[in-house]
Image (tube, rainbow, N blue to C red):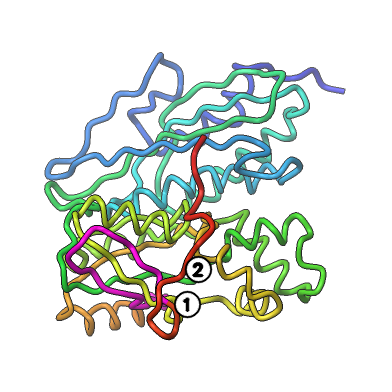
Amino acid sequence: MAAPLGEFGRIARFLAPLAEGCPGALGLKDDGAVLSPPDGWEIAATKDMLVEGVHFLPGDAPRDLARKMLRVNLSDLASMGARPWVYLLSFALPKRCDDDWLSAFADGLAMDQQEFAFSLAGGDSVSTPGPIVMDAVLLGLVEQGRALRRTGAQAGEDLWLSGTLGDGALGLLAAQGGFPTLDYVHQEALAARYRLPRPRIALGRRLIGLATAAMDVSDGLAADAAKLAAASGLALDIDTPTIPLSDAVAEAVAQDAELFERVLTGGDDYELLFTAPVEKRSEIKMLAQELDMPLARIGRALAGDSVRLLDKDGAPLSLARTGWVHG
């Protein structure tokens, strides 16, 4: 059996190749990277941490973990209309994460670097007796003065949602074996959405000039809509029957109607929630066709300071919880 590579051997074999697309990374041989954004662009920065047993399940494949770690951050960049540029990676790994584990993890990083066109710029690694902990600082580029914010919504505008809702929250249940009556195809589809989010980078870029406010849905629609409303100083009414559901979520809710509250509050969807003027409806519908992506008009902004989730009769729903709360 070959001896373990050790920290610097791991960096040289698994991580340095991931930095080849970033000259400012200096081959990961210096104490830091030297980065300069192109003229006319600003840097959008974000950072999310994932902890084993909290944000992912013990035993999840390292390739999937790498991609999820990147994608939850890519979703933040998407919500600001930024394109990915470079990232800094940090992780604390227990001894059970050997060189083969890190090789598979690096493969996952490489897959998403290629798909989303960005590169590693540096980071840090340590060992730990505790659970796996990892995070990435992602830097994106957005045209100066054009970043999408949560603060620009106006009363009278439409509220839109990309994709489908509830796949992440119910996907966690599926990954834990919580849907014995759901057919195998639907269970696998839900678990895959939990393990591998779909950051809406292309959509975020195209929403510049269309959307007045935007954010990603990571902590649950009810909670995140409240954040957007508060940032813009207005109220939101959401028509829950118009919320798009995947076939798998629709089937799960048909079997157990109480799951619909988890759809509204469970989080891990990483879709984009955004407002836009009424006169932009046709452009947004054309954009949905062009990107082959569902974009649903699910509500409206109005004067006030509340968020109401309305049923088919227009009556407010009462929820036991609004969404994921960070400890």
**Stretch in magenta:** 291-310
List the residue tagged with mark 2.
165
Furthest residue toward top: 31
**Measuring 59% from the left and 59% from the top, which residue is drawn there?**
169
List the residue tagged with mark 1.
244
Front one among 167 and 192: 167
Front one among 147 and 319: 319
Q: Are marks 2 and 1 in contact (CB under 8 Å)?
A: yes
- Can you give x and y, in whole percent of width and height, for residue 70 in the image? 49, 44
**Measuring 28% from the left and 83% from the top, which residue is drawn there?**
286
- Can you give x and y, in whole percent of width and height, for residue 320 in the image? 54, 58
- Can you give x and y, in whole percent of width and height, for residue 244 in the image? 47, 77
248 to the left or right of 221 = right
79 to the left or right of 188 = left
Q: Amino acid at mark 2?
A: Leu
Q: Quadrant of residue 126?
A: top right
Estimate how packed mark 1 is, as few (under 14), some (14 to 19) or many (20 or more) residues with alpha carbons within 10 Å. many
The answer to whether 130 is drawn above or below residue 250 in the figure is above
Q: Is residue 166 magenta?
A: no
Q: Quadrant of residue 260?
A: bottom right
Q: Is residue 308 magenta?
A: yes
Front one among 84 and 192: 192
Q: Main secondary structure of the magenta part?
A: strand
The answer to whether 119 is drawn above or below residue 226 in the figure is above
